[in-house]
């Protein structure tokens, strides 16, 4: 990794926050405050150009919400989203449209990602249709190329989604996402619904495509072993906050936060000696075992707050910790 | 990270090669399977055929009836029972009853289809908008639907009919006014179910406008409820027309309407019961076959649309 | 929960008022008043007096407000066609036949329907099942006045067993009650059958059987209870709908009930009666749906305990 030279991140999320209001919305009418569920709480993520950043956490940690907000498919309550240094947080749909060509998303549910009434040709060509590019003939040609690129024969173009397997459908989603040659790809648990062997195929595909096209990928998943093979850097989220962030191998070898350690222990392993190390921790246990670091050893990220907060304690390694003097 | 593999664990590569689609069976649109399912439902197919026969009879009415429906040609044989010459007998004004029944089919069916078409015309966009935008738009449309639901439809229809004075056009409008609600609810339900599906989000991620999403994705995927709603609105409209004509505020004579004929028939029923029987049977069979056909369609297209 | 009830109540009230305004306006838009020159020739002065007496000479919104004020005090005015009594009294009289016949229809039809549905579900795919399903389908799809007509033709005209019309003696009630019972019977038969089949297939029933619980107990104590919720909530609107009398049934059988009076009020442009009838029935439906919603919320533990939107 190139040290020193600060690069504009391909995708950056600054202090991103999302609060969902609960209840039926009537309370404010009567002067009360609606109950809120804070799904994402002041998250800072930055994906360096042409790298893969793995966003890890369990269901409910807020990681998918981050992905949706990054794509502006969900409005952020607070915070900013920057693409190649440009703030797109509040852009109107018209201004946003050209930007959308540069960032695309692949979802977890491969069946729901494809319109069941459209052929693969129509599905993959949709980006061109929406942005009014290319003639019909050109589209057919390019769709064929894209299919081949993701490992499917051109003859699939006239098929319907229900005729494909999960892995194949996921490749189609990827093909559609790559149609406009984006710089950034947000992958929201793309392999979580696939069998192990198919997972490997899709991951390899993503790896090859990333190298070939120089993509910057935000890879969201709850499967650490998957992330390990693809990501350069890992961010761990827990209950809406980032609790640890470091390059991939550092996480696997030197995790500091109790939650990260708990996740690592849960990775299935074929080594019989490693099998029973699974530890499960409750919220209180996690809170109790947060690392305590000396003020002298760390650098603050952003303004100092009271209580546990994300701090940098070594090269590229951030963790949520309590400060002692 | 184009060059460095050192921080990643290498995974075994699967060399699967390019898979061809040529050995898969021929591709088919989901609607094709629905058609196959429908064909397997014997009751529905039977009803559909009966409906088809009735429709054909209505269309070719002049060709299969001996006289016109208003000619009072047979006054000397007034009120006679069915015979070889007059299959359904003669009515009180000397008209061939069979002819009147067949032309009555024209009236009923045309009102049914046109009113159903209008119901879809109103219900589809409202349902799509309510389903897509949710929030205030949905709330408002649901309130309107609520208003239409609490007023007893027949009474209101009667009121409207008296206001408008009866006649083909007003009956169609009234029937459409009470039919759109069902279509709207069906479409709204379908749109809401699809609204958060990932392929919609994918289109939005590509920069699609709401209009594009509604036209290109939501409405085509709502074809099932639209078809079902349309076909279910037809018998409702027919019954409404028959009812209003029965009460005297629908289709006026000499135009033949089964409801109107039933009303007349009651006066004669103790002796000349054929005047009451045939329109009743005609109405019953038509409504029954249309309803069963509609149910069959619904089951074939999407059983989850029940209710 | 309380919030839910209040919100529904407000919603219902608003709906009711909007409907009342619409109806009022529409009714007065019908060309020709009750004292039209063509129907009852009157001198100008006489007409003016009558109009003033019934308050018809005032601007529409004033009439509306006066009327609604009266309604809130249960004063619906005086019917034009029968000035000797108030609308309320007339309706009270008129409601009896509708209530008796319609109510009996529902109270007889519903249990029969449930029984039919039960039998059909238990002897699935046997001739009992097919017969019950056929009856249910017919009951729902054949319009009520066709059913009435057929009943009259068969039993009154051809077989001459029962009288075709009138209201006086119980013998005359039989056919109308059968006509009224068709829809509740069909609805409950169909519903019971499908709900029972659904529940009978659920794993917990298999568990109960494995435990050795006698079949009858399983059905009555467990399965039926699970299916009960929608059956209960649909009962109230259905009862209201039927007990207020079907216009068709009353017309066919010459029963002097609410439906019949409504038709005559339209024909004679009897505003007070028309308005009162529609409003009353609308209110009853509003109430019925409201109560059904509440009942459903109460019975469905998810709504009662959970509240909406807990993530």
Image: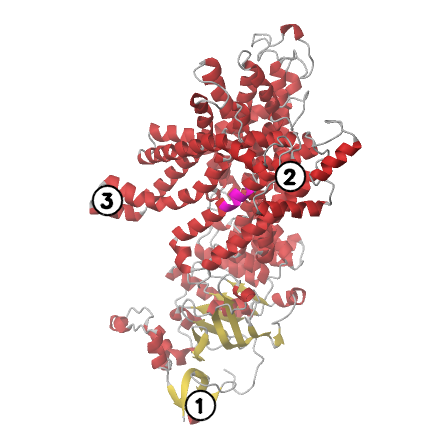
Q: Chain of mark 3?
A: C
Q: Is residue A222 above or below residue C64?
A: below
Do discs 1 and 2 belong to a common subunit?
A: no
3 and 1 marks in contact (CB < 8 Å): no
Most common SS among magenta residues: helix
B301 or C186: nearer the eye? C186
| Front in this rendered view, residue B261 or A150 | B261
Rendered image quadrant of residue C74:
top right
Residue at label 3? Answer: C209
Query: What is the span of residues highlighted in magenta in the rendered image?
Result: C282-287
At 67% from the left and 40% from the top, the residue drawn is C26
Tag 2's secondary structure?
Answer: helix
Residue B118: numbered disc: 2
x then y, percent, for residue A161 = 50, 51
Looking at the picture, tell me which residue is in the foreground, A31 or B230. Answer: A31
Residue A261 x/y as whole percent: 35, 77
Chain assignment, label 2: B
């Amino acid at each position: 990794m190139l040290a020193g030279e600060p690069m504009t991140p391909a995708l950056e999320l600054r202090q991103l926050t999302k609060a969902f209001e609960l209840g039926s919305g009537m309370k404010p009418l009567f002067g009360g405050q609606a109950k809120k569920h804070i799904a994402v709480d002041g998250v800072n993520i930055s994906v360096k150009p042409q790298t893969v950043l793995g966003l890890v956490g369990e269901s409910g940690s807020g990681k998918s919400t981050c992905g949706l907000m990054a794509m502006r498919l969900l409005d952020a309550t607070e915070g900013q989203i920057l693409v190649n240094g440009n703030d797109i947080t509040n852009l109107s749909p018209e201004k946003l449209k050209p930007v959308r060509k540069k960032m695309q998303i692949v979802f977890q549910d491969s069946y729901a990602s494809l319109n069941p009434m459209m052929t693969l040709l129509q599905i993959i060509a949709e980006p061109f249709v929406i942005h009014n590019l290319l003639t019909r003939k050109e589209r057919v040609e390019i769709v064929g190329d894209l299919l081949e690129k993701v490992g499917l024969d051109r003859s699939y173009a006239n098929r319907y989604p229900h005729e494909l397997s999960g892995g194949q459908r996921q490749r189609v989603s990827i093909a559609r996402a790559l149609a406009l040659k984006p710089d950034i790809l947000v992958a929201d648990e793309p392999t979580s619904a696939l069998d192990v062997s198919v997972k490997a195929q899709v991951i390899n595909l993503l790896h090859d495509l990333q190298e070939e096209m120089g993509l910057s990928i935000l890879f969201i998943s709850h499967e650490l072993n998957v992330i390990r093979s693809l990501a350069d850097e890992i961010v761990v989220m827990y209950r809406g906050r980032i609790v640890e962030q470091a390059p991939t191998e550092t996480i696997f070898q030197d995790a500091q936060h109790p939650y990260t350690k708990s996740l690592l222990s849960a990775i299935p392993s074929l080594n019989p000696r490693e099998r029973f190390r699974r530890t499960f921790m409750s919220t209180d246990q996690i809170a109790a075992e947060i690392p305590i670091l000396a003020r002298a050893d760390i650098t603050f990220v952003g303004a100092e707050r009271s209580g546990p907060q994300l701090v940098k304690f070594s090269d590229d390694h951030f963790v949520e910790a309590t400060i002692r003097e | 990270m184009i060059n460095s593999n050192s921080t990643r664990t290498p995974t075994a590569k699967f060399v699967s090669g390019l898979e061809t689609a040529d050995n898969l069976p021929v591709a088919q649109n989901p609607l094709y399977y629905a058609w196959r399912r429908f064909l397997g439902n014997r009751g529905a197919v039977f009803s559909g055929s009966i409906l088809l026969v009735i429709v054909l009879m209505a269309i070719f009415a002049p060709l299969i009836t001996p006289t016109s429906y208003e000619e009072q040609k047979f006054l000397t044989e007034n009120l006679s029972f069915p015979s070889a010459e007059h299959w359904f007998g003669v009515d009180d004004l000397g008209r061939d009853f069979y002819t009147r029944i067949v032309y009555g089919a024209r009236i009923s069916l045309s009102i049914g289809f046109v009113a159903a078409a209008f119901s879809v015309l109103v219900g589809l966009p409202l349902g799509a908008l309510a389903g897509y935008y949710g929030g205030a738009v949905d709330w408002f449309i649901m309130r309107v639907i609520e208003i239409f639901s609490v007023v007893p439809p027949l009474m209101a229809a009667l009121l409207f009919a008296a206001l408008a004075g009866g006649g083909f056009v007003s009956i169609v409008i009234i029937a459409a006014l009470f039919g759109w609600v069902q279509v709207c609810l069906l479409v709204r339900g379908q749109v809401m179910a699809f609204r958060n599906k990932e392929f919609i989000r994918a289109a939005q991620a590509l920069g699609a406008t709401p209009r594009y999403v509604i036209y290109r994705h939501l409405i085509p995927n709502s074809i099932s409820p639209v078809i079902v709603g349309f076909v279910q609105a037809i018998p409702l409209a027919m019954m409404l027309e028959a009812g209003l004509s029965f009460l005297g505020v629908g289709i006026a004579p000499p135009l033949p309407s089964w409801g109107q004929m039933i009303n007349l028939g009651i006066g004669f029923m103790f002796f000349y019961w054929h005047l009451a029987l045939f329109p009743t049977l005609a109405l019953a069979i038509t409504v029954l076959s249309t309803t069963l056909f509609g149910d069959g369609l619904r089951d074939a297209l999407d059983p989850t649309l029940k209710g | 929960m309380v919030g839910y009830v209040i919100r529904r109540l407000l919603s219902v009230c608003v709906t009711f008022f909007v409907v009342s305004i619409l109806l009022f306006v529409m009714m007065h838009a019908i060309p020709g008043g009750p004292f039209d020159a063509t129907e009852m020739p009157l001198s100008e002065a006489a007409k003016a007096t009558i109009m003033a007496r019934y308050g018809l000479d005032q601007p529409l919104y004033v009439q509306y407000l006066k009327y609604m004020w009266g309604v809130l005090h249960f004063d619906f005015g005086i019917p034009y066609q029968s000035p000797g009594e108030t609308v309320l009294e007339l309706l009270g009289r008129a409601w009896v036949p509708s209530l008796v016949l319609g109510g009996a229809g529902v109270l007889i039809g519903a249990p029969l329907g449930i029984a039919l549905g039960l039998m059909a579900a238990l002897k699935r795919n046997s001739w009992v099942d097919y017969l019950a399903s056929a009856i249910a389908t017919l009951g729902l799809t054949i319009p009520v006045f066709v059913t009435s007509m057929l009943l009259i033709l068969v039993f009154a005209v051809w077989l001459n067993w029962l009288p075709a019309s009138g209201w006086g003696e119980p013998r005359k009630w039989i056919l109308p009650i059968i006509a009224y019972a068709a829809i509740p019977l069909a609805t409950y038969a169909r519903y019971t059958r499908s709900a029972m089949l659904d529940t009978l297939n659920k794993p917990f029933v298999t568990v109960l059987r494995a435990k050795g619980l006698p079949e009858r107990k399983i059905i009555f104590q467990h399965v039926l209870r699970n299916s009960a919720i929608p059956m209960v909530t649909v009962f109230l609107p259905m009862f209201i709908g039927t007990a207020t009398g079907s216009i068709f049934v009353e017309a066919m059988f010459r029963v002097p009930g609410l439906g019949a009076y409504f038709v005559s009020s339209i024909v004679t442009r009897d505003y007070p009666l028309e308005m009162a009838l529609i409003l009353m029935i609308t209110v009853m439906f509003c109430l019925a749906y409201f109560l059904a919603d509440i009942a459903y919320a109460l019975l469905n533990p998810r709504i009662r305990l959970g509240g909406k939107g807990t993530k």
